[in-house]
Amino acid sequence: AQSVTQLGSHVSVSEGALVLLRCNYSSSVPPYLFWYVQYPNQGLQLLLKYTSAATLVKGINGFEAEFKKSETSFHLTKPSAHMSDAAEYFCATDWGGGNKLTFGTGTQLKVEL
Amino acid sequence: DAGITQSPRHKVTETGTPVTLRCHQTENHRYMYWYRQDPGHGLRLIHYSYGVKDTDKGEVSDGYSVSRSKTEDFLLTLESATSSQTSVYFCAIRGGNTGDYTGELFFGEGSRLTVL
């Protein structure tokens, strides 16, 4: 089964600094890849998705991710962090023919003044 | 708004009692999912449904059963709850229609279950 690994369960950045959240996937075939965000006491919502149309994917709230096949990576970035970005972020990939998503263990992003 | 409602939102129960969580959608989507979220594990798929009376197991299905008698409702049942089933449970529906796979899931707000 395909899987994703998120490096770093907690990341802390200063407001205005670059945000970099890491995700590596395990698959010999480029999969569908997703980043979701979860704010406290809420469900997950989609930030962006890769479906092989373009390697650089832009999402909501200024986030983007780049698919790098040579590194089997799909890291999430944002040039300038905002306090409102504090949340938990999940990388995910499809599994079982595209009908099921497998999630990483999540990265909690803290944004400090 | 994906029109997903989970109930109850919070429940405390005792070991050995049965528990049913309900997921209701208003969008007429075919695929529905139950995930559980635990610290350090992210979200793990319990069961999913691809149509009325059509269900399949996920990666952590032991101790859980599901039913889908109507398109709009997907029920998750713990026949005899255990403390290891204390978790936050999320229902999700898959965006897009048949033949138009987008992969995006829309999530409910979660049901927090505590088993004492």
Image (tube, coloured by chain):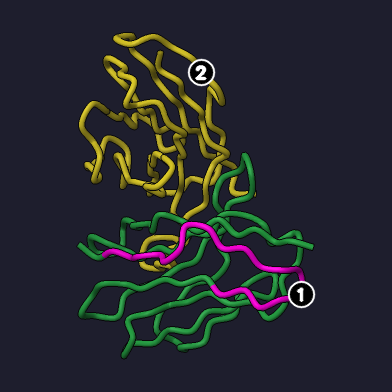
Chain colours: A green, B yellow
Q: Which residues are magenta?
A: A3-20
Residue B76's spot in the image, x, y percent?
Answer: 36, 28
At 24% from the left and 64% from the top, the residue drawn is A97
Residue B21, quarter of the rendered image = top left
Q: Is residue A104 left or right of residue B56?
A: right
Q: Which residue is mark 2?
A: B11
Q: Is residue A72 magenta?
A: no
At 71% from the left and 71% from the top, the residue drawn is A81
Q: In the image, what residue type sits under mark 2?
A: Lys
Of residue A84 and residue B96, the one placed in the foreground of this image is A84
Q: Which residue is mark 1?
A: A16
Residue B115's spot in the image, x, y percent?
Answer: 40, 17
Q: Chain of mark 1?
A: A
Q: Is residue B55 above or below residue A13?
A: above
Q: Residues within 10 Å of mark 1 (few under 14, many from 20)?
A: some
At 56% from the left and 26% from the top, the residue drawn is B9
**Secondary structure of the residue carrying numbered label 1:** loop
**Secondary structure of the residue carrying numbered label 2:** strand
Same chain for the residues under marks 2 and 1 in the image: no
Q: Chain of mark 2?
A: B
Residue A44's spot in the image, x, y percent?
Answer: 54, 51
The numbered dot on residue A86 is none
Between the residue at mark 2 and the residue at mark 1, the CA separation in whole angstroms equals 40 Å
Q: Residues within 10 Å of mark 2 (few under 14, many from 20)?
A: some
Q: From the viewer's perspective, is the residue at label 2 or at label 1 nearer?
A: 1
Q: In the image, what residue type sits under mark 1?
A: Gly
Q: Is residue A59 above or below residue B76?
A: below
Q: Is residue A16 magenta?
A: yes
Residue A75's spot in the image, x, y percent?
Answer: 47, 77
Of residue A45 and residue B56, the one placed in the foreground of this image is A45
Q: Is residue A83 above or below residue B28?
A: below
